[in-house]
Image (cartoon, rainbow, N blue to C red):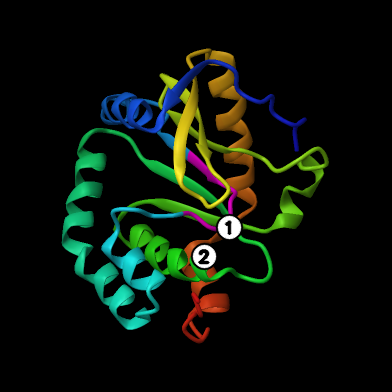
Amino acid sequence: MRDLPRPLTGEQLSSEEYLEDFYPRFWAIGEQDFWKFERLQSFQEQGSDSWEAFKRGDWLEALHLIEERRDSLKEYYERVSSSGFTTYRVRVVEEEITPYLQWQIHSLKQRAELGEHIRIIGQADIGAFERDGRLPEIVTVGTNATYQVLYDHTGVLTGAVRSDRPEDLAMWRNFIEELYQKGEDVSSFFERRVASMKPPRTT
């Protein structure tokens, strides 16, 4: 494995600026695909009905709402495919699995069924790169931009740092791709570790 990638420096964006900047670039990817590295073990998925049900402790409703969105998510990945690129994600899962990740892996399994390429790695796979602190949340967008996505201590999105430097994009994309090659397919991980788990306790 390569040396630790350098932290991003670049334009600071608020959460609103990040989303406004990201989506036009995302749909114009065209080449080199989309790569995402998720490190935090819990996020606040504001705007997700399923996540809201999970947070209030209604596990069956949370799973029902994941399934209910299948058709709209299928259309989303069909649009991705027709736009000429593929989405890849590497998800770090520590032991023990957090309630949030138990919920998210159900969601990620569905995404994988519909077209996203998702693999799971453990903390041991990245331990050598975290001696000075946790790795950041990173997305690379085609040949266009790299974002370090920022969250507060509760997992709420607060903004991002965007770099337009090709060397940053190549560095992080290659790093994420190497982790992806080591990872376990999310569907396999789901069956092995998550399918038999009891409903999570969120209070």
Q: Quadrant of the N terminus?
A: top right
Does the magenta run of residues contain 10?
no
Looking at the rendered structure, the kind of residue marked 1 is: Gln
Q: Which residue is under mark 2?
A: 101
Query: In the rendering, at what x and y percent does residue 46 appear?
Result: 34, 53
Dot 2: within a 10 Å radius of its alpha carbon, few (fewer than 14), some, or many (20 or more) residues? Answer: many
Which residue is found at the position 43% from the left and 51% from the top?
117
Looking at the rendered structure, the kind of residue marked 2 is: Leu
Q: Tell me the element at label 2.
A: helix
Q: Tell me the element at label 1.
A: loop
Residue 41: numbered disc:
1
Which residue is found at the position 26% from the left and 25% from the top?
24
Range of magenta residues = 36-43
| The quadrant where residue 107 appears | bottom left
Which residue is found at the position 58% from the left and 48% from the top?
153
Query: In the rendering, at what x and y percent does residue 9 appear?
Result: 59, 18
